Amino acid sequence: MGKYLIRRILIAIPVLLMVTVFCFGMVNLAPGDPSDLYLSQNATQVQKQEMKKNLGLDKPVYIQYVKWLEKTFQGDLGFSFASRTPVTEVIPAKLAATVELLICTLILSYALAIPLGIVCARHQGGWLDNTITGVSFLGVSIPGFFFGLGMVYIFAVELHWLPTGGMSSLGQSSGFLDRLSHIIMPTIVLSLFYCSNMLRYVRSSMIDIFSENYMRTAVSKGLSKKVVLWRHGFRNALVPIITVISSDIPKMLGGAVVTEQIFSWPGLGQLTISSIGSRDYPMLMAINLIAAVGVLICNLVADVLYAVVDPRIRY
Amino acid sequence: MVSKVVLSLSNLHVKFKTLSGTVNAVRGISYDLYEGETLALVGESGSGKSVSTKAITKVLPQNATISGDSIIYQGEDLLKKGDSKMNKIRGSEIAMIFQDPMTSLNPILPVGFQIAEPIIEHQHLSKEKAKEKAIKLMERVGIVKAEERYSQYPHQFSGGMRQRVMIALAVACHPHIMIADEPTTALDVTIQAQIIELLKELNKEFNMSTIFITHDMGVVANIADRIAVMYAGKIVEFGTANEIFFNPKHPYTWGLLMAVPDVNIKDQDLYTIPGMPPNLLHVPKGDPFAFRNKYALNIDLEKEPPMFKVSDTHYAATWLLDEKAPKVEPPKEILDRWKYFENHIENMQKKS
Ligand SMILES: Nc1ncnc2c1ncn2[C@@H]1O[C@H](COP(=O)(O)OP(=O)(O)OP(=O)(O)O)[C@@H](O)[C@H]1O
Ligand SMILES: [Mg+2]
């Protein structure tokens, strides 16, 4: 296992490098020139050259990349073009906001999806199952931004129950309830898809498991329903559940871009959009790097967890 | 043999609700199981052997409905017991072994713990005590290095070893009744013989009554005191092993006996009963075996035959036993197989 992990981490390094090369290329290929954005429209050619030099954009792309890589290895992610502050100073607060949103989403999604999925599987084909499965079908089909705007209209604009956006109310000491009221809607909107998606996976895995011979053995031992369900049934569903979670988290990061935009949630998603708008290359690269590392960590953790829950999996 | 009755089924019915209609899988089964005996249920695939025994402890899928007059165990009617009361009986008083040892154990729990589980549940022992007991049981069923293997997982065991684990699990709480549903069908011949020997030993040791399901008549001759022949959800012939092998009355039983390969004749074509069992969604009128039966009488197409008494221990449901029916002799191929059956049955009697 230890050896396996070290090998996995070693493989992750070239993967990460490739991702950064790819992202660097994409970012630079995107139309628009940062030096234009930070100068007035009637700036001279000389001023433009000066600006390019300041931003380090006068060299060929591959040299820029090597420079970026060199600095990144030293823990220096450069200066943000837009705010002229070090990237490493901007990122933490944004990352924290996004992580907060993701954790709330994970908890809400799975705390609903897992028990409901099991209930559906137990009453397969019954009215309860049909209702829940129907709703979850809607959940995976409704676009997040549509649902989000609808929520804002109803609960913020019409009913005034919840704030329209942000992480906390301005000018007030942000207490727990205030923060809670701000995070409710973005969490629900982001959860809609992941909850429905997980529910469908749990439901179908549990249906398969209920027809397994070892479940019949467990019942014929005289174990209580609860023990049969959790110890013998649910534990066998953990492998597919881990797979879904480990692929959900990176997807959620993508989903957060839209959700944060709708609810002006000051996280990485919003930062991504504004950085694209301002051609803030160093910021975009830093965000990409974080996302890539996040995905790799998720996969690694998933692999470790597989071996923990299923003794047949050994590395 | 005047023994105590430990289990008494009367008029058991099991129906399944399916998308295409109601399947009448078990259509009125009655028998008594005596203390210490081995009762074999035989019959073709789909005749209701498994379903009728799973109904005893109610381990059937949700679309099944069990009905009937009663299933009396220790003076109480199991049909009237709810799930939590049944849980006290399952595994502790009535234990089951299933056909497929490869999939009957939970792949993610240690094998030893799966044996200890019913001990903890029913005898309320501590984990350590239960472990000790489980290791002893593993040794008893022939698993070497039991202590070490206690914490291994099913995928580390061969099919035969897994079936030994299943057996250890079944006898863990010293049940009165063991239901073994084709426990050897998935195993190769030498392992089969070992497992059957083991089951016979344990039945003696723990004084269990056994319901043994199989469609291998050779195995039946080896293990059974009495035999119930099942067809289309009913028992069509019932008798002691000697009666069924040497004086069978039902043409279906004849067919089953003729289907046993005769070791004395080389290169023979294996006999099979013509046709297929009826679809239990629509059970035909009259005797459901009639359309496959060359001895069928006209009345078979009209009326299902009742159980005719042949002797105090021997009954068969065929109109051939009616006093107005023509006298028919069983096919002579059955006589050819007597020697073979005799050997098996003698072996069995020698051992006991
Ligand atoms: N869950 C179910 N739903 C619908 N029908 C079922 C179900 N389980 C069993 N049956 C039907 O019940 C009948 C009896 O099945 P059973 O499993 O008892 O046969 P069997 O005698 O044990 O056969 P085998 O030798 O193949 O094990 C079959 O016709 C089968 O199709
Ligand atoms: Mg069966």
Image (cartoon, rainbow, N blue to C red):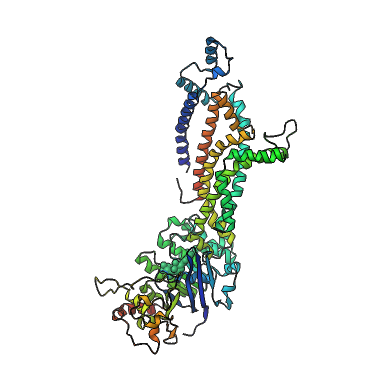
* Among the 4 quarters of the image, the one containing residue B274: bottom left
Which sits in the foreground, A292 or B232?
A: B232
Classify residue A109 by image quadrant.
top right
Q: Is residue A200 left or right of residue A264?
A: left
Q: Nearer the viewer, residue A95 or B88?
A: A95
What residue is drawn where x is 51% and y is 53%?
A: A205
Q: Quadrant of the C terminus of chain A?
A: top left
- Ligand 1, seen in the image, is in the quarter at bottom left
The quarter holding residue B318 reads: bottom left
Which x, y percent locates residue B338? 31, 80
Vertical position of residue A243 compared to residue A11: above or below:
below
Residue A260 image point, x, y percent: 61, 34
Position in image of residue B71 (x %, y %): 54, 76
At x 53%, y 36%, the residue is A294
**Which residue sits at x=42%, y=58%?**
B157
A115, above or below B163, in the image: above
Image location of residue B52, percent across then percent down: 48, 72
Residue A204: in sight, yes or no?
Answer: yes
Q: Can the viewer see residue A162 in this picture?
A: no
Outermost right residue: A172
- Left/right placement of residue A84 relative to residue B53 reads right
Q: Residue reaching furthest bottom?
A: B323
How many marks the image carries: the answer is 0
